[in-house]
Image (cartoon, grey):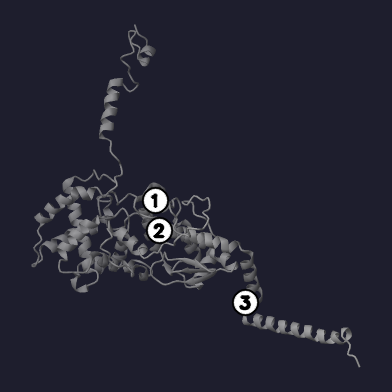
Amino acid sequence: MASGNDIEKGQVNGSDSVNVERGGRTVEQFKITLHTKLWKADSPLRSTCCIFRVPEVLRRQKKQAYEPDIVSIGPLHRGTDAKFKLVENVKEWYLKCLLSRPTTTITLDSLIERMKELEIEARGCYSDPCNHLDQNDFIEMLILDGCFLIELFRKAPDEKKQDEHDPIFNVSCMLEYLHHDLLLLENQLPWFVLEFFYNLIESDNHEPLSTVVINFFRDSVADPRILSYHKPDTTLKILHIVDLIRTSLVQEHIDELEDPNAATPKLIYHLPQRIPSAATLSEAGVKFRIGSPGCILNITFKDGVFTIPPLAIDERTDPLFRNLMAYEQCYHSCKHKITSYAVLMDNLIDTAKDVDLLCEKEIVATWLSYDDASKFFNDLYNDTTVINFVYKGLCRKVDVYHKARWNRWKEKARRDYFDTPWSVIAFATGFVLLVLTFLQTVYTLQPYYHPRSN
């Protein structure tokens, strides 16, 4: 009789052909199971993905910055929370109103048929397989969310189009919450779906959808000027709303050209070279000057002068930047421009003293306390990576300037002796007295060394 140890080893009746696992499966069954898994295996993240779940390594820094408050757009948060119920009812009401307009030629059947054609392409935009939604549920989601967004963008700037019973517009806080939720990376619809509904609903509106969306979100930022320079570019392929907002922020950015003759230091470029804070640089003679409003990324350093476009920050700035940076971290075709900006500003702003300096120069305007503003920049890019840091050339210039002793001595002299008009006057008076004393001494000693002959 075979012992228990023999069975565990697979040696039954002197044969090792019937290997039995502890789980009760034979080796042949195990092989079949593994072959089946491998046959079904596919890339978990295809190149068409552009709407992502925020990686946990980023989410853990500040979860509420990535999660919607009142509305779910797209499949990633659909049906997950009762807090979305109010706006889900609004979506259905908006669609009903759209289909019942006397002048409309839109039918529910035509919408369903068109969304069937777009379903596979739309699913391919999400990093999550969305298996919790079958074809009918996914198509329903595309129709309700797409119509809701276009109706929202259409009604927001025109009070005549707003219904008195619409909670989106008669509850004062709703638009602010919507601005937050619609700029979340996980809360997006593919842009081609939005364009379909826009061209269908607003067929007489010749304004590009990108311009309509940018105008809607200008009230969502502390300083609307950072979005006001967007120029519709038909060569740019917009992927979703977050991609559009990022494009509007970075497309006017002019990358600093590297000097081809400059020696390239042996650095790993995705580990940016740190530079001193604004207050420390100021003590070394660096001047800070406000740049032209518009593209916040157009920061320059020349002849000891930092020129930085103005940035206004409030409680809405944090989730916006975090989601833009999460998008850059996840999408393969995004340069890390917003992330590079966050890294550079974190270098310049280390404490409340640095915020005070930049606020004095009108480079930063903040509705937060100076301590909270410095913490905002210090925490913003935690756990992110930076590939091809766009300010590496600028940082090298700053580092060279800061290490030059003459610049520090010159600034120390200015700060100690020329910081007020009275100190300048005192210095000038002392210098004149010194010269006069020297001349008097010369004239006094001249007869002794050069006596006149009679």
Residue at x 18% of width, y 49% of height: 119
**411 relative to 389 in the view: left or right:** right
Q: Nearer the viewer, residue 129 or 370?
A: 129
Quadrant, the C terminus: bottom right
* Residue 329 in the image: above or below residue 307: above
User: Image quarter for residue 91?
Assistant: bottom left
Mark 1 lies on residue: 59
**132 relative to 342 in the view: left or right:** left
| Residue 321 image position (x, y, % from top left) | 39, 59
**Which of the marked residues, 1 or 2, is nearer the chain's N terminus?**
1
Whole-angstrom CA distance, mark 2 to mark 3, is 38 Å
Mark 2 lies on residue: 337
Q: Residues within 10 Å of mark 2 (few under 14, many from 20)?
A: many
SS at badge 2: helix
Whole-angstrom CA distance, mark 1 to mark 2, is 20 Å
Residue farthest along the front direction in this orientation: 453
| Residue 346 image position (x, y, % from top left) | 49, 59
Residue at x 29% of width, y 47% of height: 47
Residue at x 34% of width, y 50% of height: 332
User: Image quarter for residue 33?
Assistant: top left
**Which of the marked residues, 2 or 3, is nearer the chain's N terminus?**
2
SS at badge 1: helix
Mark 3 lies on residue: 419
Q: Report whether residue 369 is seen.
A: no
Q: Callout 2, which amino acid?
A: Lys
